[in-house]
Image: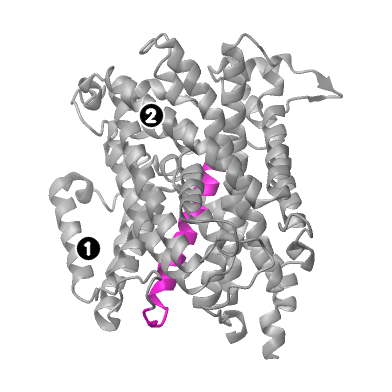
Amino acid sequence: MNQLFRRKNYSETDTSTSLLRVLGVWDIVFFGIAAIIGAGSFSSLGEAVFRGGPGVILLYLICGFACGFTALCYAEFASRIPTAGSAYTYAYASFGELIAWVIGWALIMEYSFGNIYVAFSWSDYFTSFLERLGMHIPDYLTCSYTEARKAFQNGSENKELLNAWKSAPLIGSLKFIVDVPALVINGLITWLCYVGVKESKNFNNSLVILKLAVIVLVILVGFAYINTDNWTPVNPETQVASFMPNGFAGVMSAVSGVFFAYIGFDALSVLSEETKDPQKTLPKGMIISLVLCTVIYIALTLVLTGMVDYRKFDGIGDPLSFIFEKSNANVAWMELVVSFVAIVAITTVLLVFQMGQPRIWYAMSRDGLMPEKFKTVHPKYKTPSFATIITGIAVGVPILFTDKTFILDFTSIGTIFAFVLVCAGVLMLPAKQKIKGRFHLPYINGKFIFPVIFIGGLIGFYIWQPEFFSNLMDWSNPKEGEFRASIFVFILINLVLCIFTFIKNFSLIPLIGLSSCLYLLTGMSHENWFWFGLWFALGLVIYFCYGYKNSKLRKEEA
């Protein structure tokens, strides 16, 4: 059993690598903005607003808060371990090999599956932009087979999906429905990642500048059309005007859509071996990009929920252009500009995610947990070439048979789980010597502070929402039952954390990161947990069949 939890020791001074170190602080910031401001703002934001109403702003604050403390934990690891691999590498150092494999497997879910959703979103914006220019691609070439079939079977009102199913040509008895734009952009991004990080950096930085300029324009123009009554809509059932028309459970049901906006920031730690002076550069870049993006998301959400009634966002995949449509603000030139820049924005997300996944496989292969071929570095481009190609295939093939909703939930739960383990991992790290110029996570003894914050927060929430707590044990409620059960488990886990913190004097910052990420998991449904468990069961089978036997650390200690 002890062999499963063997820890790997990394040297803080070992910055040797076969990869090319070309990234500075602002390159990291731009990659962070590229990853965070993309599909989350230009696509999943619409679904989040529909589920949570104007109150979804609170969820962005909660997610930003959780990710802020998590970013500090990532920064602490990055300052100690200047090695590619992100949370996988960090888990190997703090929890041991088995948990490291679990995290690596979760990151495959985050980057590869996340990029499937992003590719679908890119396709949506690309085809709608062409439509506005008068060019039409047949509907059966712009969506997935699964989406079209579900729309037809469930009586959806989405005309494009229904038309795709009805007009698709037959190959034998199978309808030919393929999202061609999603496949094409995946191929192009894979090629760009293959030819080098320097080329990717320059391409990314130029697109990010354009994207930020237009987002600022959206916020400035949008504020002129805000109707403040939209921030307190009337609930049709209770006839009560509220900032949270669907209740707090409704706000939390949007956690997948909101959190998807933030999952990109941890991809930055994957770039450790291509960053100049990573102990200083990575922590600064991660924190700056996260703060900037949280402010931008809150401003965007205020604009969207102020301009248009939240109920109109049902099924809207292009919310930022939707608010300027004829039926809303009726600003045609903004509608066209946003559609174009959304393509740019989502392209940058694809780029960062597609760079992240090969470097996870590269790190796992170097440790013997994946086949050696994955650590192949191209002699000319100095990129993990084989892993990059496999990543392109891993993203491209599922595009043929999956759909956006499933991928969105699947990706978010795996990422939050990885964040939980990173924060918990920092609690287990030994104290380190302070070195001038490097990031150092401040130690604040949580012995008394954390229990006071948690229990005090619990009492405050009880005073704010007494009705929710009075029904906390009613898990049979079809609307809020799952959320109540999750909150009950969340409270129990945090009470246990309070006890251990009092005994062991845990550091406050990673504790708050851990607790806030655990809270985000309460918004996940039982279906999310089922597929999450199935994915990890598959991962464990692969580990025990291959990784355990070929582990370099195991062979060194044998």
Mark 2 is surrounded, within 10 Å at the Cα level, by few (under 14), some (14 to 19) or many (20 or more) other residues, namely many
Residue named by callout 1 = 454
Q: Quadrant of residue 163?
A: top right
**In this rendering, is residue 219 above or below 65?**
above
**In this rendering, is residue 245 above or below 131?**
below
Q: Position of residue 101 (x, y in %)?
A: 61, 68
Q: Is 426 covered by the magenta stretch?
A: yes
Residue 232 falls left or right of residue 483: left
Name which residue type carries label 1.
Answer: Phe
Who's the residue at 34% across and 27% down the image?
219
**In this rendering, is residue 151 above or below 377?**
above
The answer to which of 510 and 282 lies nearer the viewer is 282
Who's the residue at 74% across and 54% down the image?
381
Q: Position of residue 250 (x, y in %)?
A: 33, 38
Number of numbered markers: 2
Residue named by callout 2 = 50
Q: Position of residue 404 (x, y in %)?
A: 57, 35
Residue 546 visible from this viewpoint: yes
The answer to which of 439 and 547 lies nearer the viewer is 439
Who's the residue at 68% across and 63% down the image?
362
Q: Would you say the magenta stretch is mainly helix, strand or loop?
A: helix
Who's the residue at 58% across and 80% down the image?
8
**In this rendering, is residue 164 above or below 525?**
above
Q: Residue furthest bottom?
A: 558
Locate the N terminus and report the quarter of the image it occupies: bottom right
Mark 1 is surrounded, within 10 Å at the Cα level, by few (under 14), some (14 to 19) or many (20 or more) other residues, namely some
The numbered disc on residue 197 is none
Specify the segment rendered in magenta. Answer: 406-434
Residue 373 falls left or right of residue 327: right
Residue 39 falls left or right of residue 179: left
Q: Quadrant of residue 301?
A: top left
